Image (cartoon, grey):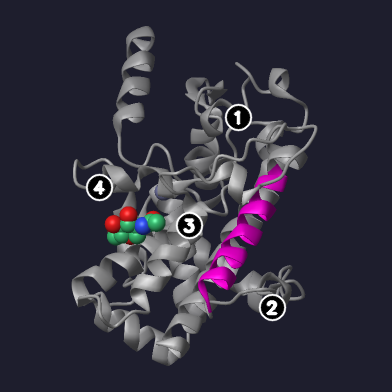
């Protein structure tokens, strides 16, 4: 039985929307953190644009882009979820916009593009609603180190074990490690994890760091939007060298990573989720201030 289940589970997860992004829970946690920090004006603006006056208005749309990319109409948006940094981890990391953002676009150009659309009143409300959903999703993706790495398709082709199950390095950073911290994959897990990280930002271990996370954040022009996103991508990518592939490929390939590896990854995953949630709040505030 077990021999049969493993390959079937692998095939199924490879075909599932969301297999190539912070899992749904990570995106929802980022969105809930953002909901905790936006201004009242931002909340009203996005509740109206998204036609949802519930407290979950950001979280429930945060994974839409991962379903859309697997539709025929949305396949053009698949490259928008990552940037393929052609660096050389763990020896050297770095993102170069000209080298790494392909002709089909990348997460940096996508944040730039959808911010321009959202700010342009000539677009229909329907198009601006899509732009909002894209931004809410991509500001999550850009914080996942392996979304800012070309090597082995962002780790998708690096086989690893997690709790004895065959999976890949990208997937454990998207889902297994975050879910091991939050306690599950549900919206409820995302919400309670977001509450914990919100407290850490307000009064705990991130209190002294949070203001610094906003350095350079600007939606003023196409150039500042690109610089903002590129800074975030560069920061996430640096963790590929310092943490994700620290010991080189051979230390992760076909290895069980639910133990010591996850212990080392945990602080980075928590930090990146907290940071992108806080940044998303302030980015949405900046959009509303400019709109
Ligand atoms: C910007 O977004 C629109 C709407 O989804 C899309 O058609 C276009 O290809 C995007 N442009 C870039 C440069 O990403
Ligand atoms: Zn994604």
- Which SS type dominates the magenta stretch? helix
Determine which residue is flagged by label 4. 74
Q: Nearer the viewer, mark 4 or mark 2?
A: 4
Q: Tell me if residue 50 comes above or below residue 78 in the rendering.
A: below
- Of callouts 1 and 2, the N-terminal one: 1
Tag on residue 203?
A: 2
Gap between marks 3 and 2 measured at Cα: 34 Å
Res 9 quadrant in image? top left
Gap between marks 4 and 2 measured at Cα: 41 Å
Gap between marks 1 and 4 measured at Cα: 25 Å
Q: Nearer the viewer, mark 1 or mark 2?
A: 1
The region drawn magenta spans 221-239
- Of callouts 3 and 2, the N-terminal one: 3
On the image, the x and y values in percent for residue 263 come to: 70, 40
Determine which residue is flagged by label 1. 151
Tag on residue 249?
A: none
Is disc 4 in contact with disc 2, using a CB cutoff of under 8 Å? no
State which quarter of the image contains the C terminus. Answer: bottom left
- Secondary structure of the residue carrying tag 3 is helix
Residue ID at (55%, 39%)? 84
Determine which residue is flagged by label 3. 109
Is disc 3 in contact with disc 2, using a CB cutoff of under 8 Å? no
| Label 3 beta carbon within 8 A of ligand 1 | yes
Q: Is residue 53 left or right of residue 25?
A: left
Gap between marks 4 and 3 measured at Cα: 16 Å
Front one among 248 and 8: 248
On the image, the x and y values in percent for residue 272 come to: 62, 56
Gap between marks 3 and 1 measured at Cα: 20 Å
State which quarter of the image contains the N terminus. Answer: top left
Q: Residues within 10 Å of mark 3 (few under 14, many from 20)?
A: many
């Amino acid at each position: 039985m077990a021999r049969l289940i493993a390959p079937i589970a692998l095939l199924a997860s490879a075909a599932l929307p969301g297999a190539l992004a912070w899992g749904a829970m990570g995106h929802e946690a980022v969105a809930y953190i953002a909901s905790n920090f936006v201004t009242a004006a931002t909340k009203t603006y996005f509740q109206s644009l998204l036609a949802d006056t519930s407290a979950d208005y950001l979280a429930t749309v945060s994974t839409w882009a991962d379903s859309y990319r697997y539709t025929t109409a949305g396949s053009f948006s698949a490259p928008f979820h990552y940037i393929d940094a052609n660096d050389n981890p763990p020896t050297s990391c770095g993102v170069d916009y000209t080298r790494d953002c392909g002709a089909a676009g990348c997460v940096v150009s996508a944040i730039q593009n959808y911010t321009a659309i959202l700010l342009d009143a000539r677009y229909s409300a329907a198009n601006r609603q899509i732009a909002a959903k894209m931004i809410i999703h991509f500001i999550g993706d850009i914080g996942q180190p392996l979304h800012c790495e070309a090597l082995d398709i962002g780790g998708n082709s690096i086989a690893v074990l997690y709790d004895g199950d065959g999976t890949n390095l990208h997937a454990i950073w998207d889902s297994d490690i975050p879910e091991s911290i939050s306690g599950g994959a549900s919206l409820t897990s995302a919400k309670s994890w977001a509450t914990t990280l919100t407290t850490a930002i307000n009064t705990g271990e991130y209190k002294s760091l949070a203001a610094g996370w906003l350095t350079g954040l600007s939606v003023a022009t196409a150039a500042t939007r690109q610089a903002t996103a590129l800074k975030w991508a560069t920061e996430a990518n640096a963790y590929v060298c310092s943490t994700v592939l620290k010991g080189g490929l051979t230390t992760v390939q076909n290895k069980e990573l639910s133990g010591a590896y996850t212990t080392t990854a945990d602080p980075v995953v928590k930090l990146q989720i907290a940071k992108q949630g806080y940044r998303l709040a302030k980015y949405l505030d900046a959009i509303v201030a400019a709109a």
